[in-house]
Image (tube, grey):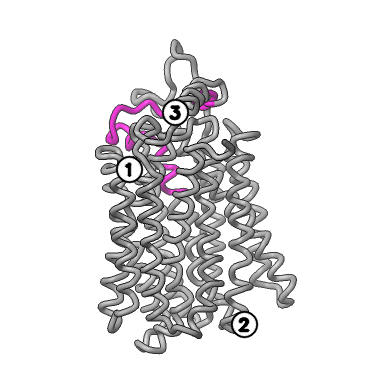
């Protein structure tokens, strides 16, 4: 068969992630309407956006630990039910206080999902192609917002923002069924996994490509936290997400208020850079696995530098065609960098600790998401409600993230079993 069981599992996770991003990003298109209904200024809108990330960041590591202990399948199913309910609940809030509570609880439940997904990737894909599989699923980070903008641009005029959230919440039932049917805790426990595919997976696990890069030799989550490599990736994720989440969350407002686009045009043009970003993220996994084993940081750094220059040009160019070309190139390259960044923990973290380890690194990313919305909200307020001021924060964070990637990440080839491990607890080592 063209589609193997592990491919079906991967596509199911991609579908669930797309719906997750659709649910969480819908609020970005509805912010102007909520602001009008509830009388909210930009700083309060920043708190609304950040309430999700506060809950989301708090449950990353617990979600990973649960996935490591009880298996990722049950964690994924629970997360899907939880966030679908609170997506619908967003449509019935009565004001700022209830909106903050619902967004926090929404994030708290969805936060257990990513680490469980990475646990599944670690179980079903060997290090030979784990970076590729992860990048394809991670492309939902870009594709989800793109679909969200296009879909909400059609739904909002017809349904209003409240009914739109109710419809999105009901759509989560499709994810629950898909995950229940397709996802298992491991290849050995999957009811439709063929013997031939299991044998191929074992051969891939023993292949030279799968063992050419070093995995951190850690026996427990506490040991993992003593590795400088994990902390470097934690802070890279945090700082880089100041740029990425700032761009995702504030672009609709920027396009409407600074570029003067209508809601319909914002839905179409605002989605384009993230469609290109989805393609870049998918390509990152293949390129990283194919040509950058042991030197993945150079792919990250090159994409960040050129992509950042294009994002800067987007804020300076007046011609609509030219600034959208610049933003699409920025989307392609910056999401390509994100896909390549997340190939690193897929290689470094041992499979048995993949849930907790990846959840910890992603906690840094979500702290960045929490901080960027509050920071940008206040920067816009202090700049006389100039939505363009937020891009100064995003571009500054991108410079810092690129420097940290260049200086802090140090990749090493795998060492023979007889050779002392330079990343062992006794000697430390970098990412």
> Which residue is at 55% across, 68% downward?
392
Residue at 54%, 21% in the rendered image: 207
Nearer to us of marks 2 and 3 is: 2
Q: CA–CA distance between discs 2 and 1?
A: 43 Å
Which of disc 1 and disc 3 is earlier in sequence? 1
CB atoms of marks 3 and 1 within 8 Å: no
Q: Is residue 143 left or right of residue 354?
A: right
**Left or right, 378 with reference to 57:** right
| Sequence-first tag of 2 and 1 | 1
Magenta-span inclusion, residue 212: yes
Q: CA distance from mark 3 to mark 1?
A: 21 Å
296 horizontally vs 61: left or right:
right
Q: CA distance from mark 2 to mark 3?
A: 48 Å
Tag on residue 72?
1
Element under disc 2: loop
Q: Which image quadrant is residue 56 in?
A: bottom left
Span colored in magenta: 210-236
Which of the numbered marks, if any, corresponds to residue 293? none
Marks 3, 1: nearer the viewer: 1
> According to the image, label 2 marks what residue?
261
Q: Residue 128, how many percent across, how many down?
A: 54, 30
Residue at image coords 40%, 32%: 187
Q: Is residue 303 above or below residue 104?
A: above
- Name the residue carrying label 3: 215
């Amino acid at each position: 068969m063209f589609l193997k069981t592990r491919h079906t599992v991967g596509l199911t996770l991609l579908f669930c992630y797309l719906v997750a991003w659709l649910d969480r990003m819908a609020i970005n298109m509805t912010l102007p309407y909520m602001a009008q209904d509830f009388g909210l200024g930009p700083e309060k809108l920043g708190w609304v956006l950040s309430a999700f990330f506060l809950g989301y960041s708090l449950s990353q590591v617990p979600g990973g630990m649960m996935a490591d202990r009880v298996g990722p399948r049950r964690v994924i199913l629970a997360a899907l039910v939880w966030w679908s309910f609170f997506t619908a609940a967003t449509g019935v809030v009565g004001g700022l206080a209830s909106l903050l509570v619902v967004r926090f609880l929404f994030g708290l439940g969805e936060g257990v999902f990513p680490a469980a997904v990475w646990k599944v990737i670690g179980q079903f894909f060997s290090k030979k192609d784990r970076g590729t599989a992860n990048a394809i699923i991670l492309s939902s980070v870009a594709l989800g917002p793109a679909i969200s903008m296009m879909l909400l641009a059609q739904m909002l005029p017809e349904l209003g923002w409240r009914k739109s959230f109710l419809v999105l919440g009901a759509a989560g039932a499709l994810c629950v069924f898909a995950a229940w049917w397709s996802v298992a805790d491991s290849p050995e426990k999957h009811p439709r996994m063929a013997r031939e595919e299991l044998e191929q997976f074992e051969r891939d696990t023993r292949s030279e490509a799968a063992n050419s890069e070093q995995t951190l030799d850690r026996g427990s989550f506490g040991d993992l936290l003593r590795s400088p490599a994990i902390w470097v990736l934690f802070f890279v994720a945090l700082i880089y997400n100041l740029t990425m989440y700032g761009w995702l969350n504030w672009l609709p407002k920027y396009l409407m208020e600074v570029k003067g686009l209508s809601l319909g045009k914002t839905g179409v043009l605002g989605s384009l850079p993230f469609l290109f970003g989805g393609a870049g993220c998918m390509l990152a996994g293949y390129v990283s696995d194919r040509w950058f084993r042991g030197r993945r940081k150079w792919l990250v750094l090159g994409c960040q530098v050129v992509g950042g220059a294009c994002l800067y040009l987007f804020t300076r160019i007046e011609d609509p065609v030219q600034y959208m070309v610049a933003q699409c190139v920025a989307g392609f390259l910056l999401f390509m960098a994100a896909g390549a960044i997340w190939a690193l923990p897929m290689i470094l973290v041992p499979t048995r600790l993949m849930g907790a380890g990846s959840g910890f690194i992603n906690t840094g990313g979500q702290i960045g998401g929490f901080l960027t919305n509050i920071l940008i909200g206040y920067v816009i307020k202090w700049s006389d409600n100039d939505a363009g001021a937020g891009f100064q924060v995003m571009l500054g964070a991108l410079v810092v993230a690129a420097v940290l990637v260049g200086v802090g990440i140090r990749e090493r080839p795998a060492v023979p079993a007889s050779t002392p491990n330079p990343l062992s607890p006794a000697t430390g080592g970098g990412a």
